Image: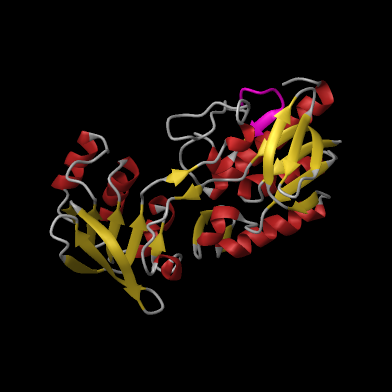
């Protein structure tokens, strides 16, 4: 019986492990191969207090510190979580664990473009986080793919930094708020290209161009760009906790300001929650809150 089981080892999960360990909770950290989570995809971090460098190096520091405080690590994935008096976690290998509390911190998965060059240039000019990486493209030519609020708002943000922004959307109409789209249409640095889809990202070591195709004529066009931002959405997988959590319309887990889900003793933190601004520092803070709440539940018996 563990005091707390932490599912996921990104910024949120590793911070939770540090705090749980410092509180002397019997802690197990269950993680797949992607230790460090989404932060690993960022090669140049300059907005994490006290640190400037690569994402993988920062997550390595998190990882070493989490192990220092005694978390048991199981390299596996969780298939199912059930709750009766305690929580029962079934791993993909069939093994079962029991815990008094569970912290969900396994993040989310970006939707893929599924085009040539996507994997090669991810982190080399291709980004899925405008807020994170826009400052790297000062006076550069960029392209954003998508038609929702994140894409259009990202284009407006980039227009303050980059020399030019192409906004590429597969339809004529946008899902983004009309007022936001109107602002983008009025911004001289933004060129809106509708009814086009990306078909290839090209370059050498870094992105040099984006090839797009007209969905009606199939005619292709090459945009010479220094950076591409894919803002086509994310997927949050919650099948393992079906019936234990509530989600919003895009599938993110709903939590209160203390990371509580609808189930007593079950907490969620980081990018898989509905909390906006998906940033490493925010995920780390949520992981700390979740661990402290788990400690209070284990020692006091309620939150």
The answer to which quarter of the image holds residue 26 is: top right
Task: Residue 283 in the image: state x and y as whole percent.
Answer: 58, 43
Task: Residue 213 in the image: state x and y as whole percent.
Answer: 21, 62
The answer to which quarter of the image holds residue 148 is: top left
**Side (left or right) of 11 relative to 229:** right
Determine the residue positioned at 72% across, 35% down.
102
Residues rendered magenta in the picture: 261-267
Q: Is residue 90 visible in this depiction of the protein?
A: yes
Q: Is residue 279 above or below residue 303?
A: below
Determine the residue positioned at 33% across, 62% down.
228
Q: Residue furthest top?
A: 302
Determine the residue positioned at 55% across, 56% down.
39
Task: Residue 286 in the image: state x and y as whole percent.
Answer: 61, 38
**Side (left or right) of 163 relative to 75:** left
**Side (left or right) of 146 relative to 26:** left
Q: Is residue 130 magenta?
A: no
Q: Is residue 278 above or below residue 216?
A: above
Task: Residue 7 in the image: state x and y as whole percent.
Answer: 68, 43
């Amino acid at each position: 019986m563990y005091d707390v089981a932490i599912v996921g080892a990104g910024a949120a999960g590793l911070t939770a492990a540090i705090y749980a360990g410092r509180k002397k909770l019997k802690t197990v950290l269950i993680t797949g191969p992607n230790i460090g989570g989404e932060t690993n995809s960022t090669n140049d971090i300059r907005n994490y207090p006290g640190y400037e460098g690569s994402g993988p190096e920062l997550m390595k520091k998190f990882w070493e510190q989490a192990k220092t405080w005694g978390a048991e690590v199981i390299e596996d994935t969780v298939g199912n979580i059930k709750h009766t008096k305690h929580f029962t976690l079934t791993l993909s290998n069939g093994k079962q664990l029991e815990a008094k509390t569970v912290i969900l911190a396994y993040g989310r998965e970006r939707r893929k473009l599924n085009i040539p060059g996507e994997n090669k240039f991810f982190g080399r000019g291709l980004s899925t986080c405008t807020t994170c990486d826009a400052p790297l493209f000062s006076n550069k030519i960029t392209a954003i793919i998508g038609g929702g609020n994140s894409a259009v708002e990202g284009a407006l943000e980039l227009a303050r930094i980059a020399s030019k922004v192409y906004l590429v959307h597969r339809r004529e109409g946008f899902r983004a708020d009309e007022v936001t789209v109107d602002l983008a249409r009025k911004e001289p640095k933004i060129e809106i290209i509708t009814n086009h889809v990306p078909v290839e990202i090209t370059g050498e070591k870094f992105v040099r161009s984006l090839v797009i195709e007209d969905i009606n004529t199939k005619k292709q066009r090459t945009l010479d760009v220094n950076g591409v931002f894919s803002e086509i959405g994310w997927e949050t997988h919650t099948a393992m906790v079906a019936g234990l959590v509530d989600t919003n319309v895009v599938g993110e887990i709903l939590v209160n300001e203390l990371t509580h889900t609808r189930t007593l003793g079950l907490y969620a933190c980081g990018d898989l929650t509905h909390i906006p601004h998906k940033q490493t520092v925010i995920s780390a803070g949520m992981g700390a809150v979740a661990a402290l709440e788990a400690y209070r539940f284990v020692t006091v018996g309620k939150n």
